[in-house]
Image: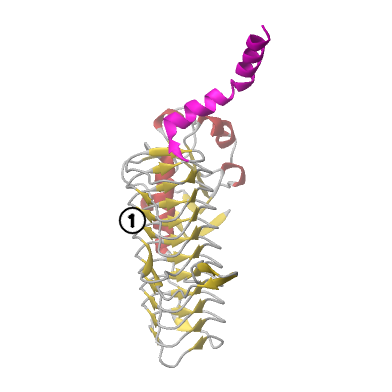
Amino acid sequence: MKKLEPSLGIAQFINLPGCRYEGDPQLRIDSASVANDATASTVIFLEQERLFEEVQSSSAGLIITTQDFAQRLPGRNLLICDKPYFTMMALISHWLAMAPDTPAGIHPTAVIAPDADVSSKACIAAGVTIGPHSVIGDGCHLMSGVQIGENVRIGAGTVMHPHAVVYDDCVIGKEVIIHSCAVIGADGFGFALIGDVQQKIPQIGNVEIHDFVEIGANTCVDRATLGSTVIGEGSKLDNLVQIGHNCVIGKHCIICAQVGLAGSTTLGDYVYLAGQVGAAGHLKIGDRAMVGAQSGITNDIPEDSQFLGTPAMEAGLMKRIMASQKRLPDIYRFYMRQIKD
């Protein structure tokens, strides 16, 4: 259960847009949880029938739910709205915004190059290293063990979790979140077979991560061979994602866990790649395209399309193929009977 401070009274959430409160006017809430962990000072939400009995029997002090469910929860403290999940998230976001800022300052064990420019409003934790000519903006929070290379630029309000790494020359925008052990700017996977030896191709480009991006734990974004590997504004990368050299990801894309993009793949805006999607290199995936889990992309994908399978094809066609596969044993038996007759 997540305890949140300060505790909230009714006045602080009763006026959330589209909401109506019914219940104890003296109620105070200090935590958010799932139903089976809830206490009398906990807020939970309900919008699915399968969870109704669990919520009904919980000790939660406040339930965010719809009008239909509210009628079945007499005597409970209720915040009634059309979209309980989004209201819950809005309430938690408001709560977190009230928390005190992390105090600015530099831990004595941090190692910072003399010519690095670190804002006096940044928080630099224990064991952080910051290389020459790097710039750390206002309100940045670099947690323990973060490694920043040479000539790196990190925008205001960016948060880097423990042991994240940014290699030389990379540019990180404002209010970016980079989770633990993510690696930004390692060499792209570039080799050429010369004679009988795999010869390394120098990777002298960089990575540009635009504003409001979030990068999950253990995700790797490789530097470009030449130019930049780019992650567009507002895009979200899950844990364990691999972005190859010179890839360009557009704005507000969703890249789920274990996706792998080979070099020079280009994504438009608002693209969704489900878990374990793999893409061959030098492909283009259009705006608002959606690709289903474990698909293998071998050709360009047009905008506003849905693709599925390996090799990835239009989702409707792939579903028909998958349905037909289930009938293959019957078709085979029928065929064998025909040739015997």
Which residue appears at 68% of the width and 10% of the height? 340
Colouring scheme applied when the structure was drawn: secondary structure
The answer to whether residue 14 of the structure is visible from this angle is yes
- The picture places residue 191, in percent across and down from the top left corner, at 52, 68
The residue at the far right in this view is 340
- The picture places residue 231, in percent across and down from the top left corner, at 38, 62
Which residue appears at 43% of the width and 58% of the height? 95
Image quarter of the C terminus: top right
The residue at the far bottom in this view is 114
Which residue appears at 38% of the width and 50% of the height? 13
The residue at the far top in this view is 341
Circle 1 sits on which residue? 251
Which residue appears at 35% of the width and 60% of the height? 232
Report the label total: 1
Nearest the viewer among 142 and 266 is 266
| Residue bounds of the magenta highlight | 312-341
- Image side of residue 93 versus residue 50, left or right: left
Q: SS class of the residue under badge 1?
A: loop
Residue 217 picture quarter: bottom right
Nearest the viewer among 116 and 263 is 263
- The picture places residue 60, in percent across and down from the top left corner, at 54, 43
- The picture places residue 261, in percent across and down from the top left corner, at 47, 55
* Label 1, residues with CA under 10 Å away: few <14, some 14-19, many ≥20: many
Q: Assess whether residue 245 is covered by the magenta stretch.
A: no
- Image side of residue 339 versus residue 56, left or right: right
Q: Assess whether residue 323 is covered by the magenta stretch.
A: yes
Nearest the viewer among 298 and 19 is 298
Q: Please name the predominant secondary structure of the magenta segment in the image.
A: helix
- Image side of residue 57 versus residue 84, left or right: right
Amino acid type at image mark 1: Lys
The answer to whether residue 80 of the structure is visible from this angle is no
Residue 321 versus residue 298 in the image, above or below: above
